[in-house]
Image: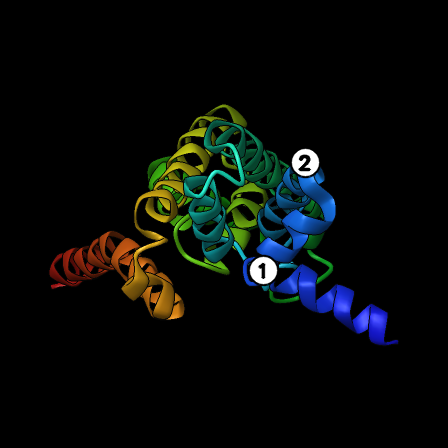
Amino acid sequence: MNWLQLFIDIFLHLDEHLATILQMFGGWTYALLFLVIFLETGFVVTPFLPGDSLLFAAGTFAALGDLNLALLFLVMATGAILGDTVNYWIGHFIGPRAFSGEIKYLKQEHLDRTHEFYEKHGGFAVVLGRFAPIIRTFVPFVAGIGAMTYSRFVLYNVVGGLAWTGLFLSLGYFFGNIPVVKDNFSLVIIGIILVSLLPGIWEYLKARREGAQAAD
């Protein structure tokens, strides 16, 4: 049981145990990083896995020479993009069944409205959703349920995945080993997340204000 608990703890807090993982698995660490990012973005039941913090931590180790930055970017961006792709198609196949009329409160008109929203504003949600923990796990799933056109989704999925991975790896690479950042790692991650949410909050407030004005 102790070994099982240790494995679960390492897997869930990979960002905190990355040095140990590197010593134990060497080059296989890249595969483990890919797997965690893929699961964190690919399934609505695993939003608790590390995402932002794992990218940041990986960037700090790349700066020390323990990991290759270019390979990290390729592996983790691929995991993020494929994860969202899988999540989209899970939602796409579940959606029609869930809104077939068998569940009282899930109606086809709600699905139609969701589809309309994602066709108009979905690109913005898919890209910015990447930068919000938990939310990024549900955005592609809802996009699939709402039947957002896949050709539109895949474009924003790739853009968001590359931007998210590149930003947090770069932040870790350039700033992760600064003493004040290392000593306040959690606070730094929280600050980055809050800043990344500001554009989404602004757009939400703007939409509410415009809706209120239209109602008046």
- Cα separation between marks 2 and 1: 26 Å
* Residue 82 location (% of width, % of height): 61, 34
Q: Secondary structure at mark 2?
A: helix
Asked which colour scheme the image uses, the reply is rainbow
In this rendering, is residue 8 above or below 19? Answer: below
Residue 110 showing in the rendered view:
no
In this rendering, is residue 82 above or below 105? Answer: above
Identify residue type, mark 2.
Gly
Q: Nearer the viewer, residue 67 or 158?
A: 67
Q: Residue at x 84, y 76 (%)?
A: 2
For disc 2, the marked residue is 27
Residue 6 showing in the rendered view:
yes
Q: Residue at x 37, y 63 (%)?
A: 182
* Residue 48 location (% of width, % of height): 59, 64
Crowding at dot 1, Cα within 10 Å, few <14 / some 14-19 / many 20+, comes out as some
First along the sequence among labels 2 and 1: 2
Q: Nearer the viewer, residue 181 or 205?
A: 181
Identify residue type, mark 1.
Pro
For disc 1, the marked residue is 47
Quarter of the image where the N terminus is located: bottom right
